[in-house]
Amino acid sequence: MSNYKDLIFDKSFINGEWTDGTGKKLEITNPADGTEVAKVYNHDISHVKKAIDAAHDAFPTWSGKTAKERSGIMKKWFDLIMKNKDEIAHIMALESAKPLAECKGEIDYGAGFVEWYAEQAKRNNGSTIPGYTEDRRVKVIKQPVGVVGAITPWNFPLAMITRKIAPALSIGCTIVSRPSISTPLTALTLVHLAEKAGFPKGVFNMVIGDDSSAMGKELCENPKVAKISFTGSTRVGKILMEQCSQDLKRLSLELGGNAPLIVFEDANIDDAVEGAMAGKFRFSGQTCVCVNRILVHENVHNEFVEKFVKAAQNLKIGPGLEEGVNFGALINTKAVEKMQGFVDDAKEKGGKVLHGGKKIDDHFYPPTVITNATPEMKFAKEEIFGPVAPIFKFKTEEEAIQMANDTVYGLASYYYTNDLNRSIRMSEQLEYGIVGLNTGLISNESVPFGGIKHSGFGREGSVYGLEDFVHIKYICTGNVK
């Protein structure tokens, strides 16, 4: 591995240039121990406006390129990401405390969107429709919407960006990216490699700053921005939706979740435990599709709990760069205290802690398993976003469906059964945008990712993800002789 420090940048990237900020620098720390990783310049809405102007000016040229030309640049970008995989993973582990193996997995996953949409760009096909009179010819074409504002969180500092901007760039849109101030270093490496790949000036801009409210408001209300794609909390998503309403801006929202994992009495319990471990404790529970509630049939409850607790005990806790670690720190002290609050609330209401349940320090909270969970406990309704795993009992399929759907959220859901008829019924009755049958891992660049209800709308990945960045134009030619 070459020196990862050569890929650490401290400025925003606007109109093809690294741009100084307000003069103030922000400290980026390692969540595992609070030590400084780097300092980056702080930027404000004046820089967001410059980035929007640059993207707006670059749009005609970039959208005017052939799909093959855009595809070629994106393939070079993909190659550069993979060539620098070890260095990017090191940077990501430092600023997010994500275990190194997971960092490398995220890079493979995130780069996959760049590669996939580099190919899909050449398949932005329209259609012809039989004329409705003898002298008319009808066709439909798809055109890029324009400037896209991408607002992304800290938990997947590379993949959340590529999942949004790869389809947009491939179709001819230009980008203003506003990554999380908690993990900007991975994002800045990404835009550096995009520059090396040959994206023209103004096509891909990135602004780093701590005034998230003002910067988001500018992206939502600036008339030069055609589309906003946001991943984050439902509360913030509603604010952005209101701000976008003034000029009816197009919007994609990937918001909070409350994912159930249901284990039926006919399930393979070992498979269910493996899926629950992957779905619950990946990145210490800090993903939007993490399992929030585990619902287990009463006949297999004890067997599942015993095996699940044993698996949780075998996780190795430590800093992301430490060899063999597969369970890292939480993003900040506030997250640690939030986990303790969930556990204390559950204990007061009759919950039984079988493993974990007490913070290790201000950075780490252990994998925690709680049985005797009930709907009255806070984690039954709220997104946990951490390593607390509550286990609920159920008796019938109908009860499991009612419990699973008893939430305002509708992003991901999982269930384990070997009954074919039940598997079909469940897939149709679960009120979620994503359903995993006998698996706890459901993300890939070729599938549509997104939710319903308070989990948002729009899809990322697959051919469906491309549709969010195009206008559909109908063209009617008359008086054809």
Image (tube, grey):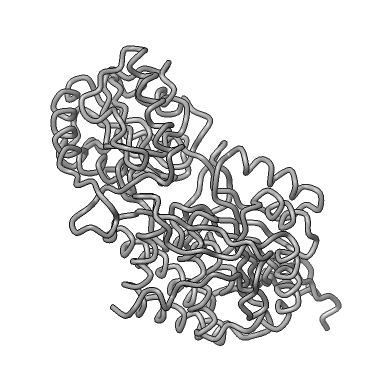
The answer to whether 67 is drawn above or below residue 165 in the figure is: below
Quadrant of image for the N terminus:
bottom left
Q: Residue at left 61%, top 85%?
A: 66
Q: In the image shown, does 87 or 64 lie closer to the viewer?
A: 87
Q: In the image shown, does 319 or 461 lie closer to the viewer?
A: 319
Image coords of residue 369 (percent x, y): 26, 29
Does residue 293 appear in the picture of this structure?
yes
Does residue 395 appear in the picture of this structure?
no
Q: Residue at left 40%, top 23%?
A: 403
The answer to whether 357 is drawn above or below residue 124 in the figure is: above
Q: Is residue 468 left or right of residue 319?
A: right
Q: In the image shown, does 252 or 41 lie closer to the viewer?
A: 41
Image coords of residue 432 (percent x, y): 46, 39
Image coords of residue 186 (percent x, y): 45, 66
The answer to whether 398 is drawn above or below residue 32 in the figure is: above
Q: Residue at left 79%, top 68%?
A: 133
Q: Quadrant of residue 19?
A: bottom right
Q: Is residue 347 left or right of residue 213?
A: left
Q: Residue at left 34%, top 66%?
A: 89
Image coords of residue 356 (percent x, y): 24, 30
Q: Is residue 123 left or right of residue 7?
A: right
Q: Which residue reaches farthest right?
A: 479
